[in-house]
Image (cartoon, rainbow, N blue to C red):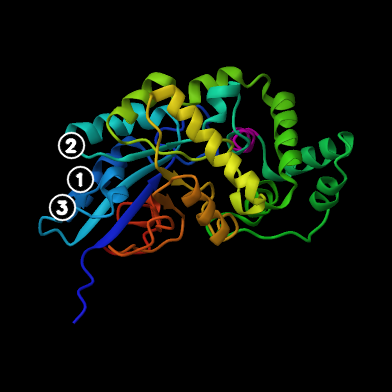
Amino acid sequence: MITIGPEILVVTYHYLLGSTFTGPGVIPFGPERFSAQVEFLARSSHFLSLEDLSSGVLPDSGGYRRYTLLTFDDGLAEQFEVAWPILRSRGIPGAFFPCTAPLKTGKLLHVHRMHALRSNMPDKDLLALLGELSIKAGFEESSRVIGGENFTEAPYPYDTPEARTIKSLLNYTLPISEREALSEMAFRQILGEEALWAKKLYMGSEMLCELSSRGCLGTHTHLHRPLSRLDREGIRREIVESLDILEKTTGRRPDSLSYPYGNHLAVSGEVFEVASECGLKCGFTTERRHGRIHSDRLSLPRFDAEDIPLGKRPVIDL
């Protein structure tokens, strides 16, 4: 008889406060719900660390029916300010996955420019603005796609049709260099210079160093691009540059990766292969299911915090 053993529940969080961007573009989880959800999970979980997962042999579950790892994407300062004290007070490790481009450029990531813009104007107006800017910039492919209906619809089941369209276009469909240039131009036109926004939004080096010293730091790549849309060398560059910067900043080289976007449009077998070649031992997707003890550690699934009890749209009962 085969013993399956405890399941592995990985939960991911993004905004906890959302104080930098206010409006419909950002829906924060909230400190109170976060604390309550941690308390709820503690009743039935042995909390894991990144070091537990990368070691290959999990610790004894202590009689709990599941292992749980709490993860935080994007490297937002509010995650350190809100979640880290709660986790530290309870002796829960957690796993934080920053993108490194803001450390190097002092600018916002494309994904966060879009959050800010969508918090300040209706999606239909933003889409029209991006169409105008693509024409002015001579981005023929982007202007053609924005003005048409032939694009890959990404899995955003909880969004309105307008939100789903703009997120699908800007996250997956447009040429990567053009989409990033368009979001930068739109941000400058609507909201001004982005350096102060970036300084407020992201963790600084001291925060990253503390998390690294506690074994709680991985990477979310350099520029938060959908890796499967890049060629093999592009995938490698996104991973290695982020690892190099984090090692230089903190003195330790992470061995875990949270894949940007993380769904079937952003990851692939080639992405997992390159991650392994770069020395990574754990990788996290956004496939919504439980993992198991013998799961491939480079393609571990995760639930969004809203998808489990005390979230707004639970899809599982723990």
Q: What residue sits right under mark 1 in the picture?
A: 39
**Distance between the Cα atoms at labels 3 and 2?**
14 Å
Please determine whether, in this image, residue 233 is positioned above or below residue 303. Answer: above
| Earlier sequence position, callout 1 versus callout 2 | 1
| Disc 1 and disc 2 in contact, CB within 8 angstroms | no
SS for tag 2?
A: loop
Taking 237 as reference, is 142 left or right?
right
Front residue of 54 and 290: 54
> Is 115 contained in the magenta span?
yes
Judge the density around disc 3: few (<14), some (14-19), many (≥20) Cα neighbours within 10 Å. Answer: few
SS for tag 1?
A: helix
Residue displayed at 48% across by 26% down: 202
Residue displayed at 45% across by 46% down: 258
| Disc 3 and disc 1 in contact, CB within 8 angstroms | yes
Front residue of 185 and 102: 102
Image location of residue 88, percent across then percent down: 22, 32
> Is 316 contained in the magenta span?
no
Q: Disc 1 or disc 2, which is closer to the eye?
A: 2
Q: What residue sits right under mark 2 in the picture?
A: 91
Image location of residue 194, percent across then percent down: 63, 22
